[in-house]
Image (tube, coloured by chain):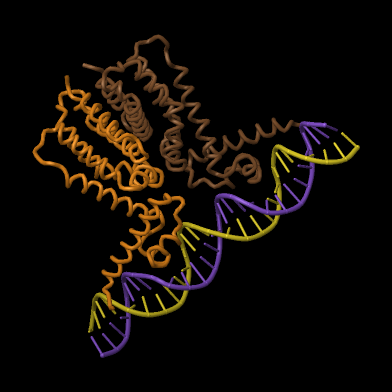
Chain colours: A orange, B brown, C yellow, D purple
Amino acid sequence: MARSNKDRTEATRTALLDAARALFVDRGYADTATPDIVSAAGVTRGALYHHFEDKKALFLAVVEREARTVAAEIEARAAPETAARKALVVGARGYFDAMSQKGRTRLLLLDAPAVLGSERAAALDRNNAEASLRAGLSNLLPATDEAGRLLDQVTALLSSAFDRAAIEIAEGGDRAAYEAAIVRLIDGLCPR
Amino acid sequence: MARSNKDRTEATRTALLDAARALFVDRGYADTATPDIVSAAGVTRGALYHHFEDKKALFLAVVEREARTVAAEIEARAAPETAARKALVVGARGYFDAMSQKGRTRLLLLDAPAVLGSERAAALDRNNAEASLRAGLSNLLPATDEAGRLLDQVTALLSSAFDRAAIEIAEGGDRAAYEAAIVRLIDGLCPR
DNA sequence: CTCTTTACATACATTCTGTACGTATGATAC
DNA sequence: GTATCATACGTACAGAATGTATGTAAAGAG
């Protein structure tokens, strides 16, 4: 079985990403050791440190892939041409569904900010889930209103509220109540 | 200089807490080694592991003390007998002031959830900063309104928004804009 | 004054991370 | 096709960190 270098790289990298994701989700970043990762992936630590600069870089790659997946799952459900408010509510449901996948809150919302720093984590969000939230809000809020003028800040704050809701739901909180609270927050932003 | 056991314990514990706080703030939990902590505190690792079960327990003690300090700083400014909305705005300013202390966002908002778990971190919040927020909101929102009925959830979401704002401000964001956005969120919750 | 407990100090075992070095195989130039 | 190079690993090692086990001196109790 002669494989091209490209194929080998691809196979090894995804094996590492898959194994690392499973362990990071299960035990958290700090309690996951690289020997366990490579053992689960069926490779050696030499392969890991060949493809990734260090453990943190591997974690970053896992998180980036996960964030893209979440964004894609939400996007897949977005009904086009719906009213701005409805689109936001649908987006909220999609986000909570996506974040219900076991361990995603830990991976994306707890470990990522601590390991990568809040700036890198926030940047990741901005390019994925937060981007669609911003788009939705900009459709809902007229630029003339104060909430519209503060679009960036309001987006960041609401995004954080979404994250907290996702965490609470993942830990057994009342999903309907948190969804209602989010909707109430959004409705409050609309001009009166 | 013959000291009682109580005094020795007190002195050693606070020396450890102070040194650990400074290093955790400066480098983060993961990049702070216990040899460095005890060296800065002028004691040995034996003393550390005598007074604290492990590194995590020391971190928890640091975070608990810090959370109480933040709550106290906010409380100290709270003007009694002001209107509900004004009280919340004053509380917001106090929170942002308190969280402006260098490294507090990292300690309380980034490392604590990752190290202690979101549940323990959330519980810490509930007993400190989040408690006064809840009280303020319960004065502002009538229990008959939806926002009032969802007080617990709304408090959690807003608390998270406060935290995100504090992080952004600490990283150079526009404080006035984030304050305005927070106020706009709160005002939106008031019944129309 | 004796006995026990507390508050440390020291030494050790385990484990992890990152690096240095060696090797085999695919890719490339001729 | 072959010589050369680059890539993709595997292995061995150095350094450091955590937690524990064990020893000791001083405080406290009776």
Along the viewing direction, whichever of A110 and A46 lies nearer the viewer: A110
Q: Residue furthest left?
A: A81
The part of the image, by quadrant, that contains residue A175 is top left
Q: Residue at x 42, y 67 (%)?
A: A44
Q: Position of residue B149 (x, y in %)?
A: 30, 22
Q: Is residue B105 above or below residue A146?
A: below
Q: Position of residue B45 (x, y in %)?
A: 63, 46
Q: Is residue A27 above or below residue A188?
A: below
Left or right side of B3 for A70: left
Q: Position of residue D21 (x, y in %)?
A: 68, 54
Left or right side of B178 for C10: right
How many numbered dots are placed on residues in this image?
Answer: 0
Residue B1 visible, this orientation: no
Quarter of the image where the N terminus of chain B is located? top right
Left or right side of A98 for B155: right
Q: Is residue A127 above or below residue B177?
A: below
The part of the image, by quadrant, that contains residue B102 is top left
Quarter of the image where the C terminus of chain B is located? top left
Residue B52 visible, this orientation: yes
Q: Residue at x 15, y 36 (%)?
A: A87
Q: Position of residue B17 (x, y in %)?
A: 57, 35
